[in-house]
Image (cartoon, grey):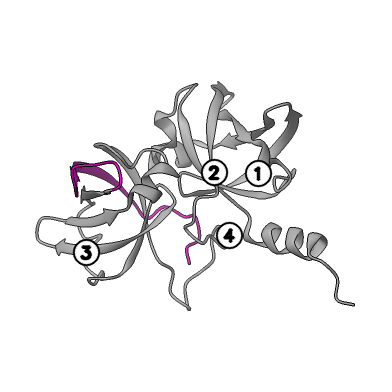
Amino acid sequence: MFTGIISGLGRITRADALGSDPSHGKRLTIAAPAGFLDDVQLGDSIALNGACMTATALDRAASVFTIDISAESLARTSGLDATGAVNLEKAMRANDRLGGHMVSGHVDGIGTVSHFAPVGESWELRILTPRELARFIAYKGSITVNGVSLTVNQVVDVAEGCELSINLIPHTLSNTTLGELQAGQRVNLEIDLIARYVERMLTAPKAD
């Protein structure tokens, strides 16, 4: 489990194919901030842009680790198939503060940035979400965007799904990759964990 509070900015420096056809995934080499890996062990979970991955090799001296990502995960996420900046979060401990909200690290869908512009000292981010996720997104509810726990300020239903609006403060822009977003860019979305259970309870067949 994670909290959606980014603990480091990393960079995918290599993305090597694990095979010669599309059924194979990739091995990613990620450069982490100095000291980020000091308490990480092989097999630990680390979220990359909101997607939970397993550390398969570590070089603490160089602050570098690797993960293997399957073709299935590559098809269901964005920003993990090539070199570039990524948000990093280590799995939470049982005694950690829950600064954001409960995040599983399982990407539910891909959204598209429809608007990103300054408003006063902050920035307004609007994301067009897939239709299958629209019913889980609510005003003042939680949403995870590229691994970052955020609060939804507005929801507008549209034919394609819904367009949600988020206010990003300067601290978030400086300490995550969200400050680099542009209109048209795809982002990883994870809906609020509680919403999954509410939807299941409302739609599951009732016992006789």
Task: Answer whether residue 6 is magenta in the image.
Answer: yes
**Could you tell me how far apart the alpha carbons at marks 4 and 1 are, in whole angstroms?**
18 Å
Q: What's the residue type where badge 2 is placed?
A: Gly
Q: Secondary structure at mark 1?
A: helix
Label 2 belongs to which residue? Answer: 109
Residue 50 place in picture, x, y as percent: 44, 51
Q: Which mark is residue 56?
A: 3
Label 4 belongs to which residue? Answer: 101
As drawn, is 200 to the left or to the right of 34? right
Which residue is nearer to you in this view: 23 or 181? 23
Give the mark nearer the N terminus: 3 vs 4. Answer: 3
Rendered position, 186 above or below 35: above
Read off the magenta span: 1-23
Location of residue 100 (image quadrant): bottom right
Q: Residue at x 24, y 43 (%)?
A: 12
Q: Secondary structure at mark 4?
A: loop
Asked if the residues shown at circle 1 and circle 2 are in contact, with their CB atoms under 8 angstroms apart, the answer is: yes
**Could you tell me how far apart the alpha carbons at marks 3 and 4 are, in whole angstroms?**
27 Å
**Could you tell me how far apart the alpha carbons at marks 1 and 3 are, in whole angstroms?**
32 Å
Q: What's the residue type where badge 4 is placed?
A: His
**Could you tell me how far apart the alpha carbons at marks 1 and 2 are, in whole angstroms?**
7 Å
As drawn, is 181 to the left or to the right of 65? right
As drawn, is 68 to the left or to the right of 163? left
Q: Secondary structure at mark 2?
A: strand
Quarter of the image containing the C terminus? bottom right
Give the mark nearer the N terminus: 2 vs 4. Answer: 4
Residue 149 place in picture, x, y as percent: 54, 50
Asked if the residues shown at circle 2 and circle 3 are in contact, with their CB atoms under 8 angstroms apart, the answer is: no
Q: Residue at x 24, y 72 (%)?
A: 41
Rendered position, 5 above or below 166: below
Q: What's the residue type where badge 1 is placed?
A: Leu
